[in-house]
Every structure is written in structure tokens, then in C-alpha cells.
Image (cartoon, rainbow, N blue to C red):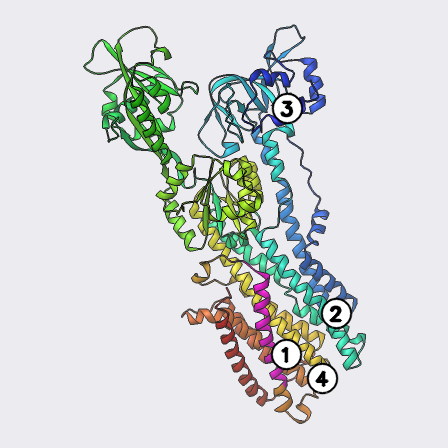
Amino acid sequence: MSDTAEDSVTALPAAADPTVPTVLQTLRRLDSGPRGLTEDEADERLARFGVNTLPAHREVSWPRLVVRGLRDPFTAVLLCLGLVSAAVASWGTACVILLLVAVSCALRASGEHRADRSMAGLRGLVAGTATVLRRTERDAPPQAREIPVDDLVPGDVIRLGPGDLVPADVRLLRARGLTVQQAALTGESAPVAKEAAATARAGGFDPPQLCFQGSGVASGSATAVVVATGARTRFAAAHGRSDARREASAFDRSVHGVSWILIRFMLLTPPLVLMANAALRDRGLETLPFAVAVAVGLTPEMLPVIVTTCLARGAVQLARTHGVIVRRLPALHDLGAVDVLCLDKTGTLTQDRPVLDRALGPDGREDPEVLRWAAAHAWWSLQLADLPAPDALDEALLDAADEDELMSYDGVAALPFDPVRRLATAVVRTPGRLGSHTLVVKGAAETVLERCALAGEERARLLARAAEQADDGLRVLAVAVAECPARLRDYTPADEHGLTFRGFVTFTDALAPTAADALKALAGQGVTVKVLTGDHPGTAVRVCHDLDIAVPRNGVLTAGRIDRLDDTELAEAAARTTVFARCAPEHKARIAAALRAGGHTVGFLGDGVNDLPALRVADVGIAPRDAVAVVRERADVVLAEKDLTAIDHAVTAGRHSGGNIATYLRVTLSSNLGNVIAMLAAGLLLPFLPMLPAQVLAQNLCFDAAQLAFAYDRQPPRTLRRPTLLRPRDLLRFITGFGLLNAVADLATFGVLALALHGPDALDDQAVFHSGWFTENLLTQALVMFLLRAGRRRAEGRVPGPVGWAAAALTAVGLLLPLSPLGALLGLTPLPPLYYLLLAAVLALYAGGLMAVRAREGESVR
């Protein structure tokens, strides 16, 4: 084999130049021939190229997966704080933080381990044996024998028949009536016609002279030469692209952005506390435990638990009620953030079957006779050609026809469709016409019209009409007939001439029954649908119009135009485009990447191997249950059915979970920030620590326990009308505004303690100050929870939900703990009645401030 043969093996299937290699050129490049290889040549190539198996997938060990979890910046900072807490003997704080770190790493490792097992889904798509032509010596005749597919090499000549799985990427040498089922590769359920003749149609899985590993022979037979095996096949290449490191999803980007905000605050807080106390109060390292406690007080320690609980509850409910399986928990949040959904037309917007649109006579008017002839052709082709099942278009004709009229004809013979003639013929005996037969010919408009007795101008007019119908998104077949004397000898394609043109039958795609309602629901949730299809642009646009999907004047982009755009231009064009037609796998991936580059959160629905690159590029990959196994394993979300209604339910569940996570972060971070500011101010103003480390920990544990209610909250309907996405800048602005307001309330409490209480119960009494501020902190946190979340339920006339009850419980703890024996153990003491009256006034002003700031924020808490 030549040194360039290996290059030709990899280049041939992906050839995009206008000249496709002929059979002779292909055999020369592979240093092979129509009689196949000798055994010695096959052994040499097997040693050179390796066995014909998919690349082995190396699983990562559990310890390495756990260590990977520490790469998350928030988890890493929590670990550092936990170690520092242990170093300064704050064992309670250290144990809580380190436990949360362990849980977070374990959850992350479990998800990655599940994803690492996806390679097993590939094995069921590869054939076990193949029929190959081999020779013992160069001059010996070839012999057909079965060999394991692992032993196939480039240059082998194989035979394919009905039911065979294509064992490698092959170039057809000869084919007879060959159709190939490529659903495993493209997701399209209809078989695709293949032929050995070289054409200029290339790219993706469309070249008619090429068949790819993972596809199966639906009908016909062929002889082919192997051009690529193992890791060099298109199937393996598609999986390899999907196995590449995935870009950060919307959830990852949001969490990382929030984490770095917290990291900056947490790294800045302890040094500030230490320096301020050393400079103004002449305190040294004895304030280190307090400094660590302040940093921990800013940390949303329950974030991993809240996030996991919110997403897990949503995922369980989806699985139980709608059969939607969320394989990667963060994907549920991403679904809630999706504002662009990319999907194919076939099987999603349509039922993957055509229906009759109209039957038109030569004058362009409705003509029932055309339907009668076309249906008779379909019926007797099915009966006489021994087809396993009717063609999809023929089935649509039979559904629309009158069965009694079909039975009035007697079938004589049938010439089945083949890709070269692009038509089929049925010969029938018409009642009342003894001694004559009628040839009914049906097929592509241009090939049927070529065989009709028509003037040049008339033929051009009819071709223009067919092209107009096709541009309108319809599939068009021409119908013609010819009368001939009855005979006993066989009919052949040579009889298909001198025909009388009867008319056209046009077909449209049957719409999915739930698609229109689901699209309206998605639009109401702020989700824009983009249609990515390999079909003619007119076909896709027609479906969009039938489903009321708005397609602007410049809203259609074809693969040829996509190839001429760079990434920046494509990002701009993708934002205003609704239909992307004639798309190959690489186009789908580029479109998804361009939409993400434009700031969108992208969901992608796919079910074929050609969708794998786009599934990996999108923020969340979605696949139906009947998708190819490897696609299901690589998808983030698996649907019980390929139904947009299920996606609508999944988006709703994602927004509920994402809304609860966002509300938790806003409430806890704004409250924590206010407390930290107040602690820093108090540390500079007071001759003692404003709160003991044990009291800080107890306060945090009470607040954290109350915030578990956010995982069980139910978002109001109006918050589901737009994507739920955490934007770090918006979050920073929100927590800064509410945090400063919280700090003002804390400082007002200091004023109450300083001005209203005198003598031994004034600020000089550490126990009184600690108790007063402890109570005020828990009550303000409960007020934040109630007003910023549960209060909206009350305003809407609803019974307070879990958050409302949790806020009430937190209030009870704040009021009763200083009076209890446990409060004494924490260094707390009962407070005088006057304090509670003054605190009520402070809280009333604080509540008014909260309502005013919330109104200014435009109800941004979700």
C-alpha cells in the first residue's frame, strides 16, 4: 500500500471538493482491486492500521475524580477556610465546612464517573462479522467468507445485503436497489438511496457513493471497498469530537462567577479584621478565630446542599411525572436558563411521515383522477414488487385514496424504484378495456417529464411549476400513463416512453400533534426556537409557517452561506436567523457555538451521531429515549418521547430549581454581607469582640437550617416567563444594596443598645451586647427571607410556603434562645423588655427600607 493511502482513507469520507473520486481512483489510492486483497496484504495492513474497533475509553479512578472536584474555586476556598478553622481550634466550624466540601466532591465525582461509562453505548452499533472477498495468492480467484469485523482493513472488498450492518466506512463499487438506514448517524428514520456512480453531492453522511459504519442496509445489495476502519471512521470521529473537553455550561459559568465574588470578599475579610484590631484595639492573633468566623459568616456554607437538593427534587419530579431523565444535575439549571432551543424538523416539529397536500392536473387545478392513478400505482407496486413495506409517500397516497377505486384495477407487473431511473412503474388492467394494459409511471418530475410526449415549451412550463411547488416546501411527484396492447412478455424500463402526463401529487410533512401548543408555551417562557435541518430550506420554512414560527425576511441561512462566514459574522447572523438548512454535523456545532458566543444559553435536541458535536457544544444537550445509545449517554437530558411538550415541562422545572437557587444566594449573601460589615464596624468601636466565635457559628447554623426551605419553595408563575440565569454583576449589585441596608439595621441596633440602655446593661456589658445583636441578626435574616420571597406569596393571597414557616421558626429561635439554658452555654443572657420595643421600631423601619429597595430593583428576586 502506498505511503499516501492512509491519508486517502481519512480524507475520502469527508471530501468536500466538487470532484468526487471515481471507483477506479479510489481503488488505486487504496492499492486494491475489485477482487479484493490477498491474505498476506490483509495481514500487513492489519498490523499497520490496527484492528477495526472503536478507540478504547480509559476510565478515570475515583480518587482522581474526587481530586478534580477540588478544582472548583468555591470548593477550594471552603477547604482552605476549614483547614484554617481547624488550625485555630475552631473545631465546630471546621467540621461543618469540611463535611460540606466532602459532600460536594463526592457528588461531582459521581456525575463524572457516570459520564465516563458512555463508551459502552457504541458497541451495539458495530457488526460482529462481515462478508469479505479474499485471495490466498495474487493470481488465485477471490473467495467470499465471513470474518470478524475486527479484522477488516482498508482495501478489503465486502458484500452487503438486506439486514447487514455496515462494518466500516466503505465506497460502493456496485449497488442494486440499495437503501441504507442511517438513523444511528443522522437521526432520520427514512432509508437513504445509495448508488455507486460518483456525483458531486458530498459532505456529512449524504454522499450516495459512500456508506458509513453504524448504518444498516434496508434493501438491495452492494459490493464495496473499505476506505476507513477503527478510529478513522466517520462514526469514531464524531464520537471523538464529542469526547473532547466540554466548554463550561451556563451553570458552570454562573457558579464560577459567583464563587470569585465570594473569594475576593473572603480573602479580604480576615486580614482587614486582624489589621483593624491590631491598629485600633492593640489586639493580636487572639482575634484570628473571630476573623475566620467572620469570613465563614460571609460564606453560603449550604450552597452545595441547597443546589443539590433543588436540582435533585426537580429531576425526580420530572422523571416521575413526565418521563424526563436528567443525567447531569446542573443541566436542570441550564434548562431553566435556556433562551434558545435548537432542534431538527423531522420527528420533532413533524411526525416523520408525509401527508398528501394536493393532486394537481396539467392545468394546475385540483384533479381527483391524478390521485386515483397515483394511488393505484402505489397499491400495485406494493403488491407486485414484493416490497417489505410501502414507501412513505406511497403510504400517504393510500391513506388519502378510496379503497373501492383501488380494487377496481387488476395488477399485471411492477418495475420498482431505483436511484438511477428515479421513478417506478406499475402495469394495470383497467376495467372495461379488454386487450390493453395501462402503464402508470410515478417519480421525480424531471425524469417523468423527459419520458412524456410534450412540446419543449410545455415541458419547461410544467418543470417550472414543479420547481415552484418544491420552493414552497412541498415534495413533488409527477404521474404519467401510457396505453399499450396486452402482452405476456415482461415489461422493462425501455417501455417507459411516449407517456401522457396526468399531473402532480404534492406532499407536506405531517405536523406533530403537540408541537404547536408546545411552541406557544416555550415562546411564553422566552425561549426562541431555531430549526437546524438537512432538508431543503423551503420545506423547513413551510413547517415553520404551519406552526406559526415567525421566519423574518432574512431568517433563513443555508450551509453554503454558513461556510463563507467567520465566527464573528456567524454569531451576528445566527441571532436573527430562524431556519438553518442543508446543515452537516459541523454546521450544527458551529451554529450552537455562535449562539453561545452571542450571549445565549443554548439547548440542543438531537438523536443521531451527527448531532454529537453540537450536543457537546450546547449548554445542555437533549436526546429522546429512542436516540442512538451513544447519543443518549452523551446527552444531559433524556426524554421519554421526542416531544416538545416534555422540553416545556423540563424548562419549567429548571426555572423552579434555578429560581430557588438564585433566591437563596441573594437572600443569604445580602444578609451575610450586612452582618460582616456590621461586625467589622463593631470590632473597631467596641472594647471587646462584637460576637463570640461560638455565637457566630450558632447563628450561621440556625440561618443555614432555615434556608433549607428554599429547596422546597415553589416559584410564582410570573417568574417562569423569562430564563433563570445567575449573572454575577447583577448579583453583586443586589447583595451590595441589600447588604448595606442590613448593615444600617445592625448599626441602628448598636445605637439602641448604646442610647436606650444605661448602667450595667449598656454597651459595656458584653453578654447584653452579644445577646441583643444575636437576636437582632436572626430577626433581620428572618425578615429578609419573608419579605424578599415568602412575602410575595402573601401579597398574592397565598398561604405562606416553606420559606414563610422557616422564617417564623428562625424568629422564634432568635427570641427564645437567649432565654434558654442553651443560650447560657453560648454566653447569651435575657434582655430587658425595653430592648424588644426599640428593636420592633428598628425592624419596622428596616422592613420599610427592604420594600422600597425591592421595588426599585423591579422585583428582581426570583
- Count the labels in the image: 4
* Separation of residues labelled 4 and 1 (CA atoms): 16 Å
Residue marked by disc 2: 90
Residue span colored magenta: 724-750
Q: Is residue 731 magenta?
A: yes
Q: Secondary structure at mark 4?
A: loop
Residue type for callout 4 = Leu
Q: Which disc is residue 686 wearing?
A: 4
For residue 816, say whether it is visible.
no
* Separation of residues labelled 3 and 4 (CA atoms): 80 Å
Which residue is rendered at x = 38% and y = 26% of the image?
A: 391
Relative side of 655 to 751, left or right = left
* Separation of residues labelled 2 and 4 (CA atoms): 23 Å
Q: Is residue 565 magenta?
A: no
Q: How many neighbours does mark 2 have within 10 angstroms: few (below 14), some (14-19), or many (20 or more)? A: many
Residue marked by disc 1: 774
Q: How many neighbours does mark 4 have within 10 angstroms: few (below 14), some (14-19), or many (20 or more)? A: few
Residue marked by disc 3: 8
Sequence-wise first label, 3 or 2: 3
Residue type for callout 3 = Ser
Sequence-wise first label, 1 or 2: 2
